[in-house]
Amino acid sequence: MKKVIMLLLLAGFVMGNASDQKQLDQYMQNFDLAEVGNMKISSVEMLTMIEEGSAVLIDIRFKEEVQSWSIPFAKNIPLNELPNRLNELPKDKLIITACPHNDRANIARLYLTMKGYNAKYVNDGLLNVVNYLKGANAVEFVEELNKNKK
C-alpha cells in the first residue's frame, strides 16, 4: 500500500507543471544515503526539538482520526488539506510530519520538501510517540514544554 501511495504522489508531481517536475527530478537525482537519514527523526529527538521550540509537529491524520485521539502539542492539518494550509507553517522551524505509522507522514514530508520547507517525518509513528509519552516521560515532557513556553 505504501508503494502505491508513493507512486501516486510521484505521478502527481510528474503531471504537474514543468517547474514541479524539474524540482522533483533534481531531488531524485541528488537523493543519496545522507538524505535517507535526513528525512527521518525519532520520537525522542522530535520531542526534544518541540520542547526547545525549534520544531513544529504536524499531525496529518484526518479529522475523524484526531477526534478519537489527539496529540495536544501537534497542529492537525490533514494530508489532503496541506496544499491549502501551507501559510500556517513557519519557514524558520523544522516541520515534522506524523501519522500513526509513517506512510502519510512521508508523503507530507516529500511535499513540504518540494515546497521549500525543512521537513522530516517521525520514523516510528505517532503510535510510538504516544507509547513513549506515558508516566514519568509524560510528566517530564509537559514540564519542559511549559517551562519553555514562558
Image (cartoon, helix red, strand yellow):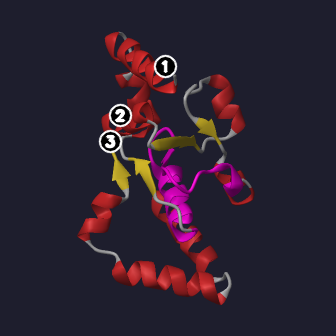
Q: What is the CA distance from the residue labelled 1 to the residue labelled 3?
A: 22 Å
Which quadrant holds residue 147? top left
Left or right of 83? Residue 39 is left
Q: Position of residue 101 (x, y in %)?
A: 44, 42
- The residue pinned by badge 1 equals 146
Q: Which residues are magenta?
A: 86-115
In the image, which disc is placed on residue 42? Answer: 3
Identify the mark nearer the N-term, 1 or 3.
Answer: 3
Q: Mark 2 is on which residue type?
A: Thr
Magenta-drawn stretch contains 6: no
Label 1 Cα neighbours within 10 Å, binned few <14 / some 14-19 / many ≥20:
few
User: Would you place residue 125 above or below residue 23 in this image?
Assistant: above
Q: Mark 1 is on which residue type?
A: Asn
User: Would you place residue 3 above or below residue 54 in this image?
Assistant: below
Label 3 Cα neighbours within 10 Å, binned few <14 / some 14-19 / many ≥20:
some
Left or right of 47? Residue 83 is right
Q: Residue at x 30, y 63 (%)?
A: 36
User: Would you place residue 71 above or below residue 21 in this image?
Assistant: above
Identify the mark nearer the N-term, 2 or 1.
Answer: 2
Q: Nearer the viewer, residue 67 or 47?
A: 47
Q: Secondary structure at mark 3?
A: loop
Q: Position of residue 67 (x, y in %)?
A: 68, 26
Q: What is the CA distance from the residue labelled 2 to the residue labelled 3?
A: 10 Å
Left or right of 84? Residue 116 is left
Left or right of 36? Residue 144 is right
- The residue pinned by badge 2 equals 48
